[in-house]
Amino acid sequence: MRKIIIDTDPGIDDAAAIAIAMFSPELDVQLITTVSGNVSVEKTTHNALRLMTLWNAGVPVAAGASRSLTGMRYDAGDTHGESGMDGFAFDEVTVQPVKLHAVEAMRRVLERSEEKVTLVPIGPLTNLALLFVQYPEVKEKIEEIVLMGGAFLRGNITPAAEFNIYVDPEAADIVFRSGLPIVMCGLELANMARITGPMVDAVRGNNPTAEMIYRLFEHYRDGDMESGLNMFDSTAVAYLLAPELYTTVDCFVGVETASPLTRGMTVCDLDNRLGRTPNVKVCTAVDPAGFQKLFIDALASANGV
Ligand code: BDR
Ligand code: CA
């Protein structure tokens, strides 16, 4: 079993990604840390706790950064709903977050783990950047970072920038320059990793998790049920489970932090024009049918309670 920490801003597609990870026997979710992104960190933490309550799961949740490194806050409630996970009648939350900041919680898990742990950030990279600045020694305990963020073509929040990177470019810059192995599952993959309403409808009777995902999808304003919803964050989790579905290029990736026009852009030197040492494995494609099968099979066999 591979030990992972998920750093997240749930988020409807985050909820789907966390579900796939939680119910995949190959993955051992050690910790969930939350960050401000799709909605405030209070809401993303509450949403993570809603999931843990639904699943009666013992995975600790630690709340993290409420703002970017430069003090900014964004909101994608127009996409994910006001709560960040609108559409399903969750029970009242019965679990509490741990009494540690996400950075301290990550440090503790990493220090105590005998084997290396993989970080799976699927929101803005603020918590990871704070961890690396404050406790650089923990890098030794990190196997790799498999993240959802960035794009090698164009953005979704500005013409140049993808949301997770745009929200905290300084943090992304620190992470991309961390020296750790990084796998980048960017925007382009999500267009190949689409799940439709009917696909989830076919399995939603199986368990409460599939039903919950179906209900969230009905309220997700990033696509539509018939033509499909972009499963951004699940592309990172699916990479851990089936890397053979992905096409990758090892290359240099830099994060633009200065230019007002392209701030948050991940400049991916896929053709090695700069001749710089590769720091990222950029995923350039995923097999759509393979991804869909992995996603739906995982959802169909989620035990839910
Ligand atoms: C990313 O932004 C968020 O809205 C999604 O959860 C995903 O992590 C896609 O740009
Ligand atoms: Ca996310």
Image (spheres, grey):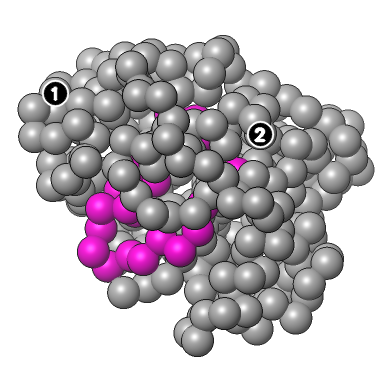
Identify the residue at horizontal 49%, vertical 54% (top origin): 60
Identify the residue at horizontal 28%, vertical 19% (top origin): 215
Assign a secondary structure to mark 1.
Answer: helix
Q: What residue type is labelled 2?
A: Val
Which residue corresponds to mark 2?
Answer: 41
Q: In this view, does 218 lie above or below 60?
A: above
Q: Give the range drawn in magenta.
A: 9-34
Identify the residue at horizontal 83%, vertical 66% (top origin): 133
Q: Which amino acid does label 1 sit on?
A: Asp
The magenta stretch spans residue 247: no
Q: Is residue 207 above or below residue 22?
A: above
Quadrant including the C terminus: top left
Q: Is residue 78 above or below residue 245?
A: above
Compare residues 53 and 220 and report the one nearer the observer.
53
Q: Position of residue 71 (x, y in %)?
A: 88, 35
Q: In this view, does 70 lie to the left or right of 141?
A: right
Which residue corresponds to mark 1?
Answer: 201
Q: In this view, does 210 lie above or below 32?
A: above
Compare residues 193 and 261 and report the one nearer the observer.
193
Q: Residues within 10 Å of mark 1 (few under 14, many from 20)?
A: some
Identify the residue at horizontal 59%, vertical 74% (top origin): 110
* Quadrant position of residue 259: top right
